[in-house]
Image: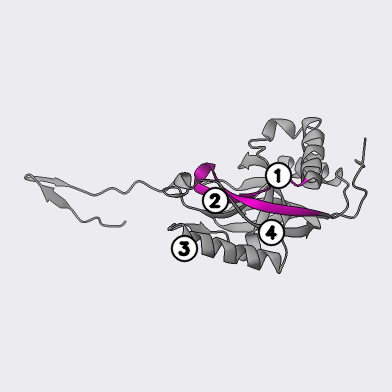
Amino acid sequence: MSRQSALVKNGQTSFPFEEPSPVREPHLFYAFLVEAPVNGMLRRWAEHYNQELGLRGWLTPTDQIHITLMGLGDGKQKRVVEIARHVGLLIQAAPFDVCFDRLSAFGGGALVLRSSNHSPALQAFWRKLSAVIDDSPLQPFVTSSLEPHVTLLRDRRSVPKVREQIVEPMSWTARSFALIRSYQGEYECPAIWQLTGQDDSLAGM
């Protein structure tokens, strides 16, 4: 049994008690993977804006940089993961170009990149995914459906003060998307799908 050091204040003895940090359950979401060398370039952007804007943020690790598509919440059971994998199989699309040119503050202190024209092909893919989810047992588990974005860093104290600004456009080709489980800073991909199909079709429809 551990021994705590007693504190004496105003003649009374007390023992310090540290509130345990809450342990988050694994977070499940869909995202586009960002491959090298683009992820390295985005990491350098994160470092640049962290310094330029006077932030003290947690920077997204290079190998975890992604385009967020759809959040499915925390602590999902294996059955939900299997449904999410099946939904991913229903999406057919060809590789397409994306472009991000706006720096914005999102909830949770996230500094993100967004697209001025919403990258039409990316928006079309996102709508396909949303439509399939809405017609599946996965729909009740959707917790966030924000526009697709890339999180560069998080700083809950200072990022909310950052004003949106136009930045140098960053473009690349999206070639795969994934189902990701995030837990204690580590990423696991229960499924990854390569974009090899037609951009105007949906399997199963």
Which residue, given by chain and number where applicable, does mark 2 sit on? 111
Sort mark 2 into few (<14), some (14-19) or many (20+) by Cα contacts within 10 Å: many
Of mark 4 and mark 2, the one earlier in the sequence is 2
Which residue, given by chain and number where applicable, does mark 1 sit on? 78
| Residue ranking furthest to the left | 11
Query: In the rendered structure, which segment of residues is drawn in magenta?
Result: 97-119
Of mark 1 and mark 2, the one earlier in the sequence is 1
Q: Is residue 156 magenta?
A: no
Q: Is residue 115 magenta?
A: yes
Q: Of discs 3 and 2, which sits in the foreground?
A: 3
Q: Residue at x 42, y 58 (%)?
A: 54
| Contact, mark 4 vs mark 1 (Cβ under 8 Å) | no
Of mark 3 and mark 1, the one earlier in the sequence is 3
Q: Amino acid at mark 2?
A: Leu
In the picture, measured across the screen, residue 15 lies left or right of residue 109, that is left
Q: Amino acid at mark 4?
A: Met
Q: Amino acid at mark 3?
A: Gln
Which residue, given by chain and number where applicable, does mark 3 sit on? 51
Q: Of discs 4 and 1, which sits in the foreground?
A: 4
In the picture, measured across the screen, residue 111 lies left or right of residue 34, that is left
Give the answer, above or below, for where 56 lies relative to 122: below
| Contact, mark 3 vs mark 1 (Cβ under 8 Å) | no
